[in-house]
Amino acid sequence: MSITSKSRRDARKRREERARNQAEANAVAPSPIEPHAELRDAQKQLLAGIVRRDGQWVLGLDGRIAGESDSAARVLALILRAAELHDRAGTNVKLVYSDDLKHAAQAEAAEQGLTFDQFRAQLVDSLAGTAEPH
């Protein structure tokens, strides 16, 4: 056996161990967050946003997660409602959202036999009903 064979064998073991550790780290890494919508005021401050994470649509308002849902139509309708409320309050806002979010919302509404605007109107009506005292 040569003098260098032990050092080569040890180097190979270290490489294999690093590769195993890297594979484990990659497997545990969190899923990526895909941004899909932003609601900003005139000073470009973020007021609300929608991201997609782990197959869920996540709605954030005022720097906090307001909720998450499987429903693209619901979160898009909610952020559109937030934009309307800001406009009514006199705050100039700009809402930008992705085509992926728009298409997913339209497809979901179509599955229910509705246009997205009809879905949105129903949601706004249901929210207005829950906001009133019973």
Image (cartoon, rainbow, N blue to C red):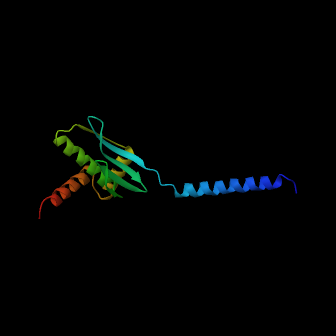
The quadrant of the picture occupied by the N terminus is bottom right
Q: Relative to 100, is 47 on the left or the right? A: left
Using the rendered view, name the quadrant where residue 54 is placed: bottom left
Give whichever of 104, 50 is nearer the camera.
50
Residue at point 60% right, 54% down?
Answer: 22
Where residue 120 appears, x then y in whole percent? Answer: 24, 52
Q: Relative to 91, is 98 on the left or the right? A: right
Where residue 111 appears, x then y in whole percent? Answer: 33, 58
Give whichever of 94, 114 is nearer the camera.
94
Residue lying at the far bottom of the rendered structure:
134
Q: Is residue 8 above or below residue 134?
A: above
Where residue 53 appears, x then y in whole percent? Answer: 41, 54
Where residue 104 appears, x then y in whole percent? Answer: 37, 51
Residue at point 23% right, 56% down?
Answer: 123
Using the rendered view, name the quadrant where residue 46 is placed: top left
Q: Relative to 98, is 25 on the left or the right? A: right
Residue lying at the far top of the rendered structure:
43
Give whichever of 73, 67 is nearer the camera.
67
Residue at point 40% right, 52% down?
Answer: 52
Q: Relative to 117, is 103 on the left or the right? A: right
